[in-house]
Amino acid sequence: MRHYATDSASAAGRILALCMVVDGNLAPSELRALNRSRLLDYINIDIDTFHGLLDQLCQDMLTSSVQQECVVLGQDTIDALLREIEAPELRRQLLQAMWSIADADGVLADAEAKLLARACVIWSAESGFVQHEAQLASAN
């Protein structure tokens, strides 16, 4: 996997891209959720740049994570990508957007749940947000 500077727009954009493709399916509802989150504006990248990051992520996954004809990202790889984000406010913003993206198609896939869980572990100070969002979602 490529390395991006800590707290960079590229590192943050890749986390969003990962949330969209980690379950093996990029749903249009996930792109709409990303749009609604306005996080691309927050991290100051445009949609074309995001699509480039998404493409690079998919290329990296195919070249470094293929095992027996499927793509598998190990926990160490996911953890390394998450550790590129250190700023607490950026972590909170990303967690909020990741939750919205993962929930956009109405199905929380195992891979999405694992990514959110790892984000909670790595970004432990911000993990209360995801728990709060889960409670709100189950109340609705």
Image: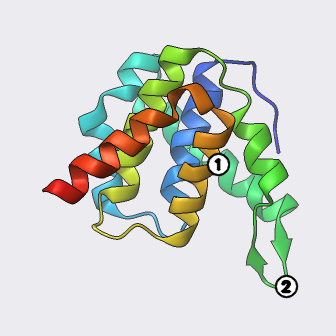
| Residue with the most extreme bottom position | 68
Q: Amino acid at mark 2?
A: Gln
> Picture coordinates of residue 139 (x, y %)?
16, 55
When the figure is inspected, residue 69 is found, relative to residue 128, above or below; the finding is: below
28 or 120: nearer the viewer: 120
**Mark 1 vs 2, N-terminal side:** 2
Is residue 76 left or right of 32 when viewed as pictured?
A: right
Disc sitting over residue 68 in the figure: 2
Callout in the foreground (1, 2): 1
> Picture coordinates of residue 101 (x, y %)?
37, 50
Disc sitting over residue 61 in the figure: none
Is residue 59 left or right of 31 when viewed as pictured?
A: right
Q: Is residue 30 visible?
A: yes
Disc sitting over residue 118 in the figure: 1
When the figure is inspected, residue 95 is found, relative to residue 33, above or below; the finding is: above
Q: Quadrant of the C terminus?
A: bottom left
> Picture coordinates of residue 126 (x, y %)?
51, 28
Q: Amino acid at mark 1?
A: Arg
